[in-house]
Amino acid sequence: MGKNTGNRYSEEFKEGAIKLVRENKQSVAEVCRNLGVSRNAMDRWLATEADNNDDEKIRLHQLEAENRQLRKDKADLEDTVEILKKAAAIFSQSQRKNMK
């Protein structure tokens, strides 16, 4: 006999079962009954999927915060460049007057 690795169902099967519950609004009991899956297995799959989505949401919020900070830094740098351009223009005018 082969060794039981605990991977009785494929990832595609699990994703399909989760989709039936989440998107098609079927009850967990109904999906379990129709697919021949235990309630415990289905609960584990749903919990794992929720954990994965939470990680994705956390990462999305981190990226959004980083994006806001980068935009702010960019605006500050653009302001600095404008100030430096004006200062360079003033200094070059001053030098031209001194050369005359």
Image (cartoon, rainbow, N blue to C red):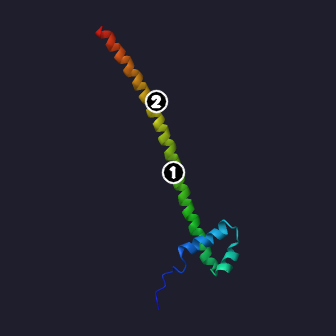
- Which SS class for mark 1? helix
Type of amino acid at the residue the image marks with label 1: Gln
Q: Is 51 positioned to the left or the right of 30 in the image?
A: left
According to the picture, the residue beneath numbered tag 2 turns out to be 79
Q: Quadrant of residue 18?
A: bottom right
- Which SS class for mark 2? helix
Q: Quadrant of residue 87?
A: top left
Pick the quarter of the image with the C terminus. Answer: top left
Q: Residue furthest left?
A: 99
Q: Residue furthest bottom?
A: 1
Type of amino acid at the residue the image marks with label 2: Asp
How many marks can you see? 2
Residue at the image point whose x is 55% and y is 72% from the top: 12
Disc marking residue 29: none
Disc marking residue 62: 1
Residue at the image point whose x is 58% and y is 75% from the top: 13
Query: Residue 77 in the image: x percent, y percent?
Result: 43, 33
Question: Against 4, is 78 above or below?
Answer: above
Q: Residue furthest top?
A: 100
Question: Against 27, is 72 above or below?
Answer: above
Q: Is 99 positioned to the left or the right of 46 in the image?
A: left
Q: Mark 1 Cα within 10 Å, few/some/many (few <14, many 20+)?
A: few
Residue at the image point whose x is 56% and y is 60% from the top: 54
Query: Residue 94 in the image: x percent, y percent?
Result: 35, 13
Q: Mark 2 Cα within 10 Å, few/some/many (few <14, many 20+)?
A: few
Query: Residue 6 in the image: x percent, y percent?
Result: 51, 80
Say which of marks 2 and 1 sits in front.
2
Residue at the image point whose x is 51% and y is 51% from the top: 62
Q: Earlier in the sequence, mark 2 or mark 1?
A: 1
Q: Quadrant of residue 92?
A: top left
